Image (cartoon, rainbow, N blue to C red):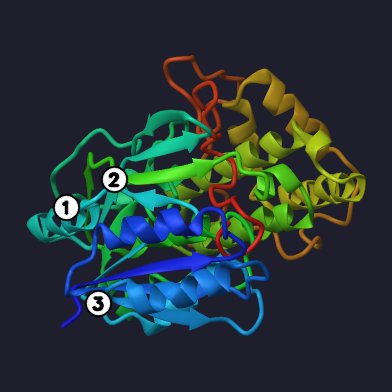
């Protein structure tokens, strides 16, 4: 029996793939399989993976006939996975020796559906520890109870799929697949679905995943139209959350996070091509009109003045009739608007960061979480 399946997408990462593959070799066991997914690379990546198929114990090489992006490539690996447990790695990141065995031990000891873990962010020669924003560790907990509060970073803001391990029963229930074709923010609907629908999870402090940032092929560097997939991703989060039995409680968190990411992008439009920047504004304005309006008002009142004013100006942008721009205005399950709190403005204190208030130099938790090489390997 295969104990652990590791899904590793690759797309045009010839510079970094050898590091990833060496780290897999340092984690190999007889009961581990490594599903290497080539997402139609056009550089030397296919040749590197062909050699790995011969030389890496447990390697299974899968090839997509056309480039589909990270979400689709991960799904290719999930469809072929045979393991009792599953995890992910991106083709330009790497693992510490023995990390996968430690990760497997953590979920077996806790006996839960999935486990989330910290990671090391690598920007050039700099290293920084990024922790799961959840205080309780080493115990099995309810994932639904880790979604809130709305005005703080929580586990759904830490969406990295490779920062954890997942029991196969989640795959069998249809909870591990990603939305095909999403080029960015693909793990946002995914992590929200896990926290809404899985029964148990845990958090551990392992530091065995090394996440590479700031490389030249990153979507965050390129700034083309693929960046705008975050709107489709967060529309999915809102639509699915609105149908949840606890929608009235959960929607304020989903709306506030969506607002944070829109504001994040609007605040850095200089990195986009001009036509993409215009499309970003138009699509973001339409997204605000689709949100449950009372929940949106409460979210804006809870944000700092700069972000709130930017979004309020965009909200007033003329557009199609309310509810007719790419769909309906969302209404929580059970009917009626979500309950609101005080209507006066409230600014988050520095010690109580909002979901898009990162530490200096860190990626914004409200920003798209899956943006590395502009293809399957991010």
Asked if the residue under mark 1 is in contact with the one under mark 3, i.e. CB atoms within 8 Å, the reply is no
Asked if the residue under mark 2 is in contact with the one under mark 1, i.e. CB atoms within 8 Å, the reply is yes
Q: Name the secondary structure under disc 1.
A: helix
Q: Name the secondary structure under disc 2.
A: loop
Instruction: Give the image quarter of residue 274.
Output: top right
Residue 27, how many percent across, how many down?
24, 59
Upstream in sequence: badge 3 or badge 1? 3
**Disc 1 crowd, CA 10 A, few/some/many (<14, 14-19, 20+):** some
Residue 263, how many percent across, how many down?
69, 35
Res. 277 mark? none
**Disc 2 crowd, CA 10 A, few/some/many (<14, 14-19, 20+):** many
Relative to 83, 333 lies left or right:
right
In the image, is residue 268 above or below residue 115?
A: above
Relative to 307, 358 lies left or right:
left
Res. 208 mark? 2
Residue picked out by circle 3: 83
Residue picked out by circle 1: 102
In the image, is residue 284 above or below residue 313?
A: below
């Amino acid at each position: 029996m295969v104990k652990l399946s590791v899904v590793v997408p690759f797309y045009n990462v010839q510079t970094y793939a050898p590091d990833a593959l060496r780290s897999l070799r340092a984690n190999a066991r007889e009961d581990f399989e490594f599903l290497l997914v080539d997402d139609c690379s056009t550089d030397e990546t296919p040749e590197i993976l062909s050699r790995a198929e011969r030389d890496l114990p447990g390697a299974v090489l899968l090839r997509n006939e056309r480039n589909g992006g990270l979400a689709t490539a991960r799904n290719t690996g999930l469809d072929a996975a045979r393991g009792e447990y599953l995890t992910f790695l991106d083709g330009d990141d790497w693992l510490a020796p023995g990390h996968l065995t430690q990760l497997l031990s953590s979920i077996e000891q806790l006996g839960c559906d999935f486990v989330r873990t910290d990671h090391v962010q690598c920007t050039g020669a700099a290293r920084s520890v990024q922790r799961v924003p959840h205080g309780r560790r080493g115990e099995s907990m309810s994932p639904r109870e880790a979604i809130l509060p709305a005005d703080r970073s929580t586990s759904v803001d830490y969406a990295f799929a490779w920062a954890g391990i997942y029991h196969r029963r989640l795959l069998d229930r249809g909870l591990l697949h990603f939305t095909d074709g999403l080029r960015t923010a693909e793990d946002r609907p995914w992590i929200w679905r896990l926290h809404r629908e899985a029964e148990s999870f845990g958090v551990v402090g392992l530091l065995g995943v090394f996440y590479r940032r700031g490389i030249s092929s990153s979507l965050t560097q390129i700034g083309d139209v693929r960046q705008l997939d975050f709107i489709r991703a967060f529309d999915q989060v809102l639509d699915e959350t609105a149908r949840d039995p606890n929608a009235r409680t959960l929607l304020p968190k989903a709306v506030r996070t969506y607002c944070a990411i829109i504001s994040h992008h609007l605040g850095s439009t200089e990195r986009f091509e001009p036509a993409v920047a215009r499309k970003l504004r138009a699509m973001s304005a339409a997204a605000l009109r689709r949100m449950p309006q009372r929940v949106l008002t409460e979210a804006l009142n809870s944000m700092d003045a700069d972000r709130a004013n930017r979004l309020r100006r965009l909200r007033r942008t003329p557009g199609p009739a309310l509810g007719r721009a790419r769909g309906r205005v969302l209404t929580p399950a059970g009917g009626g608007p979500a309950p609101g709190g005080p209507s006066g403005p409230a600014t988050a204190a520095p010690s109580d960061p909002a979901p898009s208030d990162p530490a200096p130099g860190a990626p914004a938790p409200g920003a798209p979480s899956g943006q590395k090489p502009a293809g399957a390997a991010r």
